[in-house]
Image (cartoon, grey):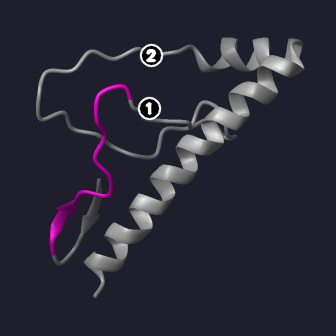
Amino acid sequence: MVHSRAKGPVVIDTLNEGEVFGWSWLVPPYSYFSAARAVTPVSAIALDGACLRGKCEADTELGYQLLKRVATVMHHHMQAARLRLLDLYE
């Protein structure tokens, strides 16, 4: 969700069951930059980013496989955000 001066809070993406939210743990400076709001009850799993990065450094195959999967998620979310932002600014 982002905030528009003209429209207030604007939904950028909607997630469904089993989808991933957040990858700031992977990209320096490792700071959270987005917001989310659940409209139904949610169960979520939080990961220790520093620990996971350490494991990926120690096991480069793990790191590579994880990065490929996270990149796919990032690509999906960026495409969805682009389309919604186009709608917002038309």
Report the amino acid beneath label 1. Val
| Apparent side of residue 81 relative to residue 36 in the rendered image (left or right) | right
Residue 7 at x, y = what percent?
A: 15, 72
Q: Nearer the viewer, residue 73 or 6?
A: 73
Dominant secondary structure of the residues highlighted in magenta in the image? loop
- The single residue placed furthest to the left in the displayed view is 40
Q: In this rendering, would 86 be left or right of 70?
A: left
Q: Secondary structure at mark 2?
A: loop
Vertical position of residue 51 compared to residue 83: above or below: above
Q: Range of the magenta residues? A: 7-18
Q: Which residue is mark 2?
A: 46
Q: Which residue is mark 1?
A: 20
Say if the magenta span includes residue 3: no
Residue drawn at point x = 12 percent, y = 35 percent: 39
Q: In front of the other: label 2 or label 1?
A: 1
Q: Quadrant of residue 71?
A: top right
Callout 1 environment at 10 Å: few (<14), some (14 to 19), or many (20+)? some
Residue drawn at (85%, 20%) of the image: 61
- Residue type at mark 2? Ala
The residue at 52%/15% (across/down) is 47
The secondary element bearing badge 1 is classed as loop
> Height in image: 77 above or below 37?
below
Of residue 31 and residue 23, the one placed in the foreground of this image is: 23
Earlier-in-chain disc, 2 versus 1: 1
Where in the figure is residue 73, as x and y percent of width and height? 54, 42
> On the image, which quarter does residue 62 sit in?
top right
- Residue nearest the observer in this picture, 58 or 75: 75
- In whole angstroms, how far apart are the C-alphas of marks 2 and 1? 11 Å
